[in-house]
Image (tube, grey):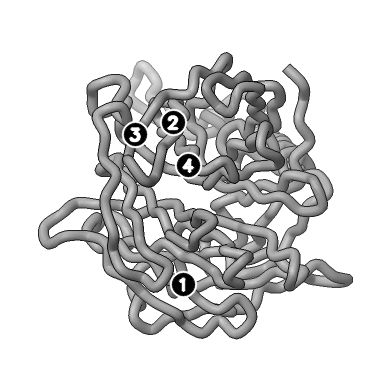
C-alpha cells in the first residue's frame, strides 16, 4: 500500500505515506511498466526473421506459404476471411482474398493449400461459445472464387471444425476437436465418410480430451498424420479403411497444434513450444529432435515451410486500435 490513512488509538485519523510515499509509488509503477515493456519486447524479438504485419481483429488462426503467389495466406476470425501477407519495405498490411458471404458470422480456422489443383481449403466453425456449425470451403488460388462450400455437422451435433488437409487425389480432410473425428470430402465437395476410432481417445477424462484431434497433414506415402492436442498423441491414419495406429514418439507433443511436413521423415508440430519430430521407419515410431519457443505470449498455432525454413503463425494480435499487429515467426530449433 503506497498511501492512505490509519486510525489512531484515540480514534482520530492520521495520514500514512506507505513505504516512502507517493514518490516511491510512482517510481515502483514506472519500474514495473518498464519491466513489462522490456519483457514484451524480448518476447517479440524471439520471432526471429519472420514477418510482422498489420491486420483486422485479434485472432488469426492459421498461416500457409503460397510459393506460387509469393505470399502467406492467413485465416482470420474477423469476417471468417482469408487474407494475404506479402513481405516488403515499410509497413506490411494484410489484404483480404477470400470473404465468403455464406459463412458470415462464422470463423475461418484451419487453412491448407491444395497446390496440384491450385486451390485454397478453409475449415469454418461457429464463433465460440457456440459449437454447432462446421463446414469446409474450396477456393481458386489466384482469384479466390468459390469452388464449393460443404456443410459437415449434423443437426444438434456439438462440433468444432479445426484443421484441414488434402490427399493426392484431391479429397479433403477436416478434424473435429470436440468429437475427435475426421470428416472426409470428395474433390468436388461431396461428403464421403467420417473417420471415428476409439484409438483416438488414449486416456479417458474431460481434461485429457478437452482439445482433441487438431492438426492434420497428408503424407506422400498415402496416410494422414493427426495430433491430439491435450493428450499429445500423434496418430497415423489410413484414409481408405479408417485404420488408426499410435505413432510411438520419444518426447512430449502435448499442446501440439498445426502440422507441416518438411520432408517425408521430418515434421513440424506448432504449439507451445513448437517441436521438430523425425521418423526413420515411416512413422511407426518417431522422436522429438528440436524445440522452438518464440513469442510465447502470442501462442503458436500453425506451421508452414518457406524456402526450407519453418514459419510459425501466432494466433493473437496486439494493439489498442482496430488494427492489430500480427506475427509469423521464423522458427530456430534448439536441438534436443
Q: Which residue is mark 4?
A: 224
User: SS of the residue at dot 1?
Assistant: strand
Q: Residue at x 61, y 44 (%)?
A: 260
Q: Position of residue 76 (x, y in %)?
A: 51, 65
Left or right: where 142 falls relative to 161: right
Q: Which residue is mark 1?
A: 138
The CA span between labels 2 and 3 is 10 Å
Q: Which mark is residue 326?
A: none
Q: Give the mark count.
A: 4
User: SS of the residue at dot 4?
Assistant: strand
User: In the picture shown, does residue 277 fall above or below 147?
Assistant: above
The CA span between labels 1 and 3 is 27 Å
The CA span between labels 4 and 3 is 11 Å
User: SS of the residue at dot 2?
Assistant: strand
Q: Earlier in the sequence, mark 4 or mark 3?
A: 4
- Taking depth in this image into account, of 31 and 107 the one nearest to the observer is 107
Nearest-to-viewer mark from 2 and 3 = 3
Q: Which residue is mark 2?
A: 235
Q: Few, some or many C-alpha atoms within 10 Å of disc 3 (few <14, some 14-19, many ≥20)?
A: some
Nearest-to-viewer mark from 4 and 3 = 3
Asked whether the beta carbons under mark 4 and mark 3 sit within 8 Å of each other, the answer is no
Q: Which residue is mark 3?
A: 243
Left or right: where 331 falls relative to 171: right
- Taking depth in this image into account, of 143 and 252 the one nearest to the observer is 143
Asked whether the beta carbons under mark 4 and mark 2 sit within 8 Å of each other, the answer is yes
Q: Kindly indicate the quadrant of the structure image that contains residue 128.
A: bottom left
Amino acid at each position: 500500500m503506497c498511501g492512505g490513512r490509519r486510525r489512531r488509538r484515540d480514534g482520530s485519523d492520521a495520514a500514512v505515506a506507505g513505504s516512502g510515499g507517493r514518490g516511491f509509488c510512482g517510481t515502483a509503477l514506472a519500474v514495473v511498466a518498464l519491466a513489462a515493456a522490456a519483457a514484451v519486447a524480448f518476447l517479440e524479438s524471439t520471432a526471429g526473421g519472420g514477418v510482422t504485419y498489420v491486420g483486422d481483429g485479434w485472432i488469426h488462426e492459421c498461416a500457409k506459404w503460397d510459393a506460387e503467389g509469393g505470399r502467406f495466406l492467413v485465416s482470420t476470425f474477423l469476417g471468417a476471411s482469408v487474407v494475404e501477407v506479402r513481405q516488403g519495405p515499410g509497413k506490411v498490411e494484410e489484404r483480404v482474398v477470400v470473404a465468403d458471404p455464406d459463412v458470415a458470422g462464422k470463423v475461418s480456422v484451419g487453412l491448407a493449400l491444395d497446390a496440384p489443383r491450385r486451390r485454397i481449403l478453409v475449415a469454418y466453425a461457429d464463433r465460440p461459445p457456440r459449437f454447432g456449425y462446421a463446414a469446409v470451403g474450396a477456393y481458386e488460388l489466384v482469384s479466390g472464387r468459390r469452388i464449393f462450400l460443404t456443410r459437415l455437422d449434423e443437426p444438434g451435433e456439438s462440433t468444432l471444425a479445426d484443421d484441414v488437409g488434402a490427399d493426392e487425389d484431391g479429397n479433403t480432410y477436416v478434424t473435429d476437436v470436440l468429437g475427435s473425428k475426421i470428416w472426409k470430402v470428395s474433390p468436388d465437395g461431396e461428403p464421403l465418410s467420417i473417420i471415428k476410432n476409439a484409438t483416438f481417445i488414449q486416456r479417458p477424462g474431460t481434461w485429457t480430451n478437452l482439445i482433441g484431434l487438431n492438426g492434420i497433414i497428408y503424407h506422400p506415402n498415402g496416410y494422414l498424420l493427426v495430433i491430439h492436442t491435450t493428450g499429445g498423441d500423434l496418430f497415423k491414419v489410413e484414409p481408405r479403411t479408417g485404420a488408426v495406429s499410435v505413432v510411438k514418439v520419444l518426447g512430449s507433443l502435448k499442446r501440439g497444434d498445426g502440422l507441416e511436413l518438411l520432408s517425408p521423415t521430418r515434421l513440424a508440430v506448432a504449439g507451445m513450444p513448437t517441436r521438430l519430430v523425425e521418423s526413420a521407419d515411416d512413422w511407426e515410431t518417431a522422436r522429438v529432435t528440436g524445440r522452438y519457443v518464440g513469442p510465447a505470449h502470442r501462442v503458436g498455432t500453425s506451421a508452414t515451410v518457406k524456402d526450407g525454413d519453418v514459419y510459425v503463425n501466432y494466433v493473437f494480435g496486439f494493439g489498442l486500435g482496430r488494427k492489430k499487429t500480427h506475427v509469423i515467426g521464423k522458427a530456430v530449433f534448439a536441438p534436443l
